[in-house]
Image (tube, grey):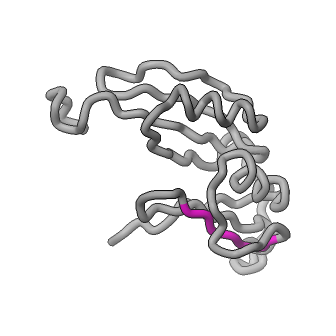
Amino acid sequence: MEITQTRLLVSDFPAVYRFYRDVLGLTPQFEAETGPYAKFSPDTGNAAVALQDRAQMAGVLEQLRAQPQGHRALVVLRVDDLEATHAELTARGAEFTRDPAPMGERMRVAYLADPEGNLIEFQEWLVPRGQTGDARA
């Protein structure tokens, strides 16, 4: 089994699309600002973030449900320089819910939310996996 993407179900597709493209700077695999589906790839790695219109997906599943409350997803993005990323994204209009800070011994993290309230965690690894004695690495 291979994880190929994190998919977010969104209500305001154009706003979320522009956020991932314009604020985070991810590259869409194809232009689809009005939806109902788009896939973004970071500059490196194989992971992807995909957006899908919530109403369209409900139709695919032949069910309509009330929109869930709270966060709907967490996307984790690894960066080389968290301070530089934080500064760049803040300059583009991102409002972080938690500024860069340590998380344990091996990484620093910062959080922001997209226009739909999905959380995004930025990680800067300070110590490579397996070098802290942390069994969860």
In this rendering, position of residue 75 left or right of residue 114: left
Rendered view: 18 above or below 36: above
Closer to the camera, 38 or 67? 38
In this figure, what is the number of numbered marks? 0
User: What residue is shown at x 53% (from left), y 57% (from top)?
Assistant: 42
Q: Position of residue 113 (x, y in %)?
A: 69, 38
Residue 13 lies within the magenta run: no
In this rendering, position of residue 131 left or right of residue 78: left
Q: Position of residue 51 (x, y in %)?
A: 68, 64
In which quadrant of the rendered image does the N terminus lie?
bottom left
User: What residue is shown at x 70% (from left), y 60% (from top)?
Assistant: 9
SS assignment for the magenta stretch, majority? strand
Rendered view: 72 above or below 34: above
Closer to the camera, 72 or 121? 121
Q: Position of residue 110 (x, y in %)?
A: 55, 29
User: What residue is shown at x 65% (from left), y 34% (from top)?
Assistant: 88
User: What residue is shown at x 48% (from left), y 29% (from top)?
Assistant: 109
In this rendering, position of residue 39 left or right of residue 45: right
Specify the quadrant of the image occupied by residue 130.
top left
Instruction: Point out the stretch of residues depicted in magenta.
Output: 35-41
Residue 36 lies within the magenta run: yes
Q: Position of residue 37 (x, y in %)?
A: 71, 72
